[in-house]
Image (tube, grey):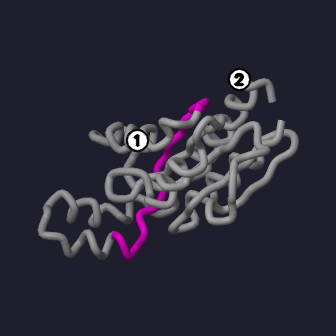
Amino acid sequence: MKTLVTYFSQTGKTKKVAEAIYESVEGEKELKELSEVESLDGYDLSFIGFPIIAFGPAKEGKEFLEQKAAGKKVALFITHAAPEDQEGIEAWLDRCREAAASAELVGFFDCQGELSEAIANALLKSDNPMMKSFGERRSETLGQPDETRLQRARDFAREVMAKLGG
């Protein structure tokens, strides 16, 4: 089985998750940034990762899925600055699933990452109290994904591979 692990990362945290997944994939495999991938042709499975930005998939991830993933076996891995149990996060994740609607979604993983300093500063300047509160919580995201979350990503990769017989 030939497997691709590809990602878009703003802070380097989605890249960390991609590397953890890549470590756990057996067989022929490649690790590339989304911008380096011309096509998913030739891969039996593609793990595709990106962060949540503005309550939905990063533009780079959404466009990649819409343009290149149709009919392909895909497992998504998503990072976000919110804790996994935060109210409302399922709607954000559903938007990521919707972006992959033309693909055969064989797995889905999400975990907390780190809110970039630049985005936190922009949120702190917002007149919207909810946006401002997200910016104020940046310190809670520092160091994420931690080793526990990275281990969950490795386990996710092994589960997807086992399910597909790889």
**Left or right of 126 in this view: 152:** right
Q: Which residue is mark 2?
A: 163
Q: Which quarter of the rendering shows the N terminus?
A: top right
Q: Which residue is mark 1?
A: 93
Residue that lies at the very extreme toward the right in this rendered image: 27
| Residue at 35% in and 37% down | 90
- Inspect the magenta stretch and tell me whether residue 109 lies in it: yes
161 relative to 29, above or below:
above
- Amino acid type of disc 2? Lys
**Left or right of 24 in this view: 68:** left
Label 1: which secondary element: helix
| Residue at 27% in and 65% down | 136
| Residue at 18% in and 70% down | 126
Label 2: which secondary element: helix
- Amino acid type of disc 1? Leu
In the rendering, at what x and y percent does residue 112 appear? 46, 50
Mark nearer the N terminus (1 vs 2): 1
**Mark 1 residue crowding within 10 angstroms, few (<14) / some (14–19) / many (20+):** many
**Mark 2 residue crowding within 10 angstroms, few (<14) / some (14–19) / many (20+):** few
In the rendering, at what x and y percent does residue 109 appear? 54, 39
In the rendering, at what x and y percent does residue 125 appear? 20, 75
Q: Nearer the viewer, residue 30 or 63?
A: 63
| Residue at 71% in and 23% down | 163
Q: Is residue 165 visible?
A: yes
In this picture, which residue range is highlighted in magenta? 104-119
